[in-house]
Image (cartoon, helix red, strand yellow):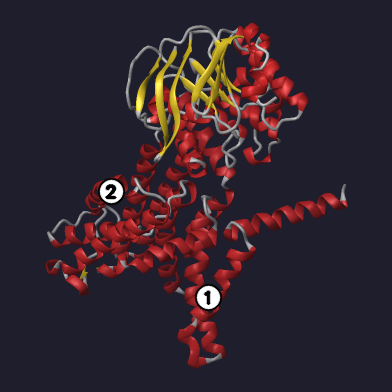
Amino acid sequence: MLELHEIETGYGTGQVLFGVSLTVPPGACVSLMGRNGMGKTTTVRAIMGQLPLSAGWISRFGDNHGQRPSFEIARAGIGLVPEGRQIFSNLTVRENLKTFYRLPAGQTGESWNLDRVLALFPRLAERLEHAGSHLSGGEQQMLAIGRALMTNPKLLILDEATEGLAPIIRHQIWECLNLLKQDGQSILIIDKNVDAIAKLADHHYILDKGKVVWQGDSISLMRTPDLKSRYLGV
Amino acid sequence: MSGIRNLIGLVYEGVKDNRLLWLLIIGFALFPIITHFADLPFWNDVAMRIMLLGMAAMGLNLVLGYGGMVSFGHAAFIGIGAYCAGISQFYGITNGWVHLGFSIITCGFAGLVIGYLALRTSGIYFIMITLAFAQMLFFLFVSLEAFGGDDGMSIDRAEFGFIDLYDPLRLYFLIWIALVVVGMGLMFIVRSRFGVTLRAIKSNASRVEAMGLSPLRFKIVGYVISAVVCGIAGTLFASWQEYVSPDIMHWTRSGELMIIIILGGLGTLAGPLLGAIVFLLLEECLPLLLGAAAPAYAENWMILFGPFLIMVVMFGRGGLIGLLSQLQVRRNARSDHRGP
């Protein structure tokens, strides 16, 4: 589905990633963890084609494309829920969702549309005509996830989707992600909540100073003793 | 059949949501009756000028207000539209429909080229590049001696088949119909998915790109549409004025269009038309008022106009439309307070 091979990239002359390799198999939920400033969001930006690679390659859905415009990469089937939500504050909830609706060719299974997204997030149905700027943080996060689902992505990427949310909202988001996973949605998730992520994801990568320093499944994540204190700061 | 019914439904919804715009447009249709009975034909001329500049401002508003692209060169498209009429007349093509077609194609093409080059930049660079293109075109027409150069050239009013433009009322209603068509077209565009995407781009272009749409393509299409609308206004302007000169595309006119939009209300359909009405009426009336109070200063009416603009911008966030909706909110709040 998605494969990163020894990618190196950064901003200007400041290199951030020093050879990151990562694989998301179809239908899997993979996590990317690490402290702040270790290159998680940079990895996402590289996947989205927003940063040029200085080394390595990224294969998305089997086609080994090099540099492509970012919007084509998204169109190929990547739905991004960006860090800090970044919904369109001057559009209504309905406009935020409907504008980016898309049905990729060869879609299998039930596709996402407005009704289905609203069934997943009933809160949004109540606020359909409200401007994005009038939503609470949790509602904005639901909207950002709903907006990504409306593009019917083959791969959903969530960058800090539960950051800064009240515990009850956070819980709702995790439940909804579980539903998506059971649906067979491939997911790449970045989060700091190790316990929740260990339950959700099948495979984990830990980034430290732009390198993958550890990878493994949930059981070994929980069993390796000094992992959390050394790389995750918890 | 159901297609037509859908269309009527869409028009109805759109008109209902933009009552002010259509009230203003209906007002323009009724205005000649007033001037007829009051015997003030001069004001028909003012109204035509308002409609033409309002139309151009509505076109610019698509990129400026909805798309967040501060184009400081849209007078160039008015000029190109006017010269399309002028040059056609010069070569003996008197049919106004041909002028309009010529203008739409030329402005569309010019908008495509300028947009394609300028829209790679943003912010202050975009402002400067659009201004630079407009100045290039301005001096191009200044240097074209065959078409009057600096002095411009007098032209006849175009022939629109059965519409004799030397009958002032027919010219008035030709301009009015163009305003209706432009208003309706822009209303559909703004309410379409395209229009919503344009607003999304104004909010955050890189986010739109991450959602799988190319902001540049949307911006270019928006830029071309706004150029064409300004071109239509320019072509009709030439017939109204019976005269074309580079003055019509002077950079101050680009500024005037921006002032009209900001005065009326950025990113609203009715804003630019309302702005044009207030702007041009003040331009007509302030000298008279000032002349009555202090005859020696009548030509310095700008001294009143400037502070007025500043006040609207400072106190009416969102221009006159913003002020109106603030009043509306306050009135609703008061009636809510009293309660039933």
Compare residues B199 and A158 and report the one nearer the observer.
A158
Q: What number is the disc on residue B104? A: 2
Residue A132 in the image, given as x and y percentages of width and height: 63, 38
Kindly tell me whether residue B39 is visible in this rendering. no
Residue kind at label 1, given as amino acid type = Phe
Q: Is residue B279 above or below residue A122?
A: below
Q: Which image quadrant: the C terminus of chain A?
A: top right
Q: Secondary structure at mark 1?
A: helix
Q: What number is the disc on residue B84? A: none
Q: Which image quadrant: the N terminus of chain A?
A: top left
Q: Is residue A37 left or right of residue B49?
A: right
Residue kind at label 2, given as amino acid type = Ile
Compare residues A40 and B123 and report the one nearer the observer.
A40
The answer for which chain carries disc 1 is B
Q: Is residue B314 above or below residue A182?
A: below
The tally of labels here is 2
The answer for which chain carries disc 2 is B
Residue visible at 16% across and 56% down in the picture: B93
Q: Is residue B232 above or below residue A212?
A: below
> Which residue ends up furthest to the bottom in the rendered image?
B296
Residue visible at 52% across and 81% down in the picture: B303
Residue visible at 49% across and 35% down in the picture: B207
For label 1, the residue is B305
Residue B293 in the image, given as x and y percentages of width and height: 57, 89
- Which tag, 2 or 1, sits closer to the chain's start? 2
